[in-house]
Image (cartoon, rainbow, N blue to C red):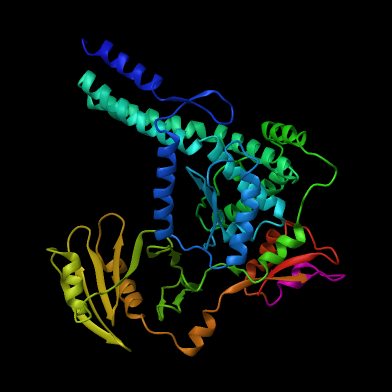
Amino acid sequence: MIFRPLLVFVLAGLVLGGCAANPVTGKQNFVMMSEAQEMALGQQASEQIAQQMSMLKDPKLQAYVQRIGTQLANKSHRSGIPYQFNVIDSPDINAFALPGGHIYINRGLLIYLNSEAQMAAVLGHEIGHVTARHGVRQQSIAMSTGLIGQLITIGTGMPAAGDLSNMLGTAMVRGYGRDMELEADGLGAEYLARTGYRPEAVLDVIGALKNQDTYSSQKAAAQGKQVESYHGLFSTHPTHDQRLQQVVAQAQGLTTGDAQRVGRNDYLQMLDGMIYGDSPEQGIVRGQRFLHTELNMVLDYPKGWVILNRPDVLLTHTPDEQGFIALTMENLSNTNVSAEELLRARVGKQRLTQDQAFSGTGYKGFTATIPGDNARRVAAIVRGKQAFLFIGAFRGRGPLELYDEQFVQTIRSFRPLTAADKKNAQPMRIRLVRARQGDTYAKLAKGSPLGAEAEARLRLLNAHWPEGQPKAGQWLKVVR
């Protein structure tokens, strides 16, 4: 009991010592870092992003996004910090901001937008997170609840109190989400208006991404799966949300003149030729086959397996998500190491059984199992300076034989690309066409590489989902 008054005093000092004026509202917010620390944190995080994610190799588009983003940032509440805008070479529909003005947008999101104003709405939303210091406030709450948890544990002698405070901190962070996202939307709409764009572009983006989210959710539900959405009100709130309508209406009062920038045709021209879906630099998925031109490799997966191509690992799983196989790749400094030596070095002191060497065109491999309650299939393939490492596992306990035949089948399917593979590994691209009289999405979908999804995807790409049709003379995005 004697520790509790001291604990309250310490906590009060912690909170009072961590307040700073919000650059947007002027109100006192709880933060635990200075602006200089915020800049350093953002720079460190951006360096990690650069190592983990590939930036789109399109200088013209990168410069375009930087130019529009800078115009918006110059009208923001924190125009003095050095904003950087980057396009990530990813098909995922996402955008995010780091503390200090590092803002990222995926090409997968860009292709579902239909004007410069809509792209500006996304960038403005992310700038809003930076100007209101949302990232810093979230980080500060997370840091403080961890410290509070430690102090409560010391003061009460009850470890559970620390766990409870961490749970409370998580709830607080998640609770901030909706208000912060709404604030970011309001700020984004304000920056649009001050830069000469239609603030209603915020609603256009929300509508387009809500349609994409609904379609993906319906498709996933039919397959018994779930999908993750782009963060924020862009996917979680409808366009008729009252608070959202209010913040956009307030921004509308800041516009000057009758003409407001939209930039539909200019924006679409920037997208012409952009890769749709997988990029050759990251590998192409065609049905149950994974092809990578730069690594000169092909893998075939069993029917029904789901292929998840991530920057750091190629992960696939069975339809019931019980069996998994992961592939990572590394460059070898010692080209004399054998596949067996490499694999044994990677598994350390773990015992290997059912070991077997195998080989193919230009490579040598070695595979084995790690026995036990959670048995695993492991393998290494060495080709020159390249090493490919596989691990197959499953949820819970059970015999490895449930999946091992499929694990081995996948590993042994490894081979270099043929001429036909190289042709098949060419990416799909966005192309612009002008709609003619009588054109429909059903007609445009015929022969599309998108297959059965073509008609729906073309509608989503052109903001005509679920039943809209093109108008004669209108520029449309198609996939070829």
Report if residue 440 lies within the magenta region.
yes
- When asked about the image quadrant of residue 338, the answer is bottom left
Residue 216 place in picture, x, y as percent: 59, 55
- When asked about the image quadrant of residue 409, the answer is bottom left
Q: Is residue 29 left or right of residue 157?
A: right
- Relative depth, front residue between 267 and 219: 267
Residue 443 place in picture, x, y as percent: 77, 72
Q: Quadrant of the C terminus?
A: bottom right
- When asked about the image quadrant of residue 347, the answer is bottom left
Residue 259 place in picture, x, y as percent: 83, 47
Report if residue 32 lies within the magenta region.
no
Q: Is residue 295 above or below residue 78?
A: below
- How many numbered marks does the figure carry? 0
Which residue: 66% across, 63% down? 457
- Relative depth, front residue between 124 and 226: 124
Which residue: 45% across, 79% down? 293
Q: Is residue 303 left or right of residue 153?
A: right
Which residue: 60% across, 41% down? 233
Q: Is residue 347 visible?
A: yes
- Relative depth, front residue between 436 and 372: 436
Q: Which residues are magenta?
A: 434-447
Which residue: 61% across, 43% down? 125
Q: Is residue 370 visible?
A: no
Q: Is residue 17 left or right of residue 378?
A: right
Q: Quadrant of the N terminus?
A: top left
Q: Is residue 458 above or below residue 240?
A: below
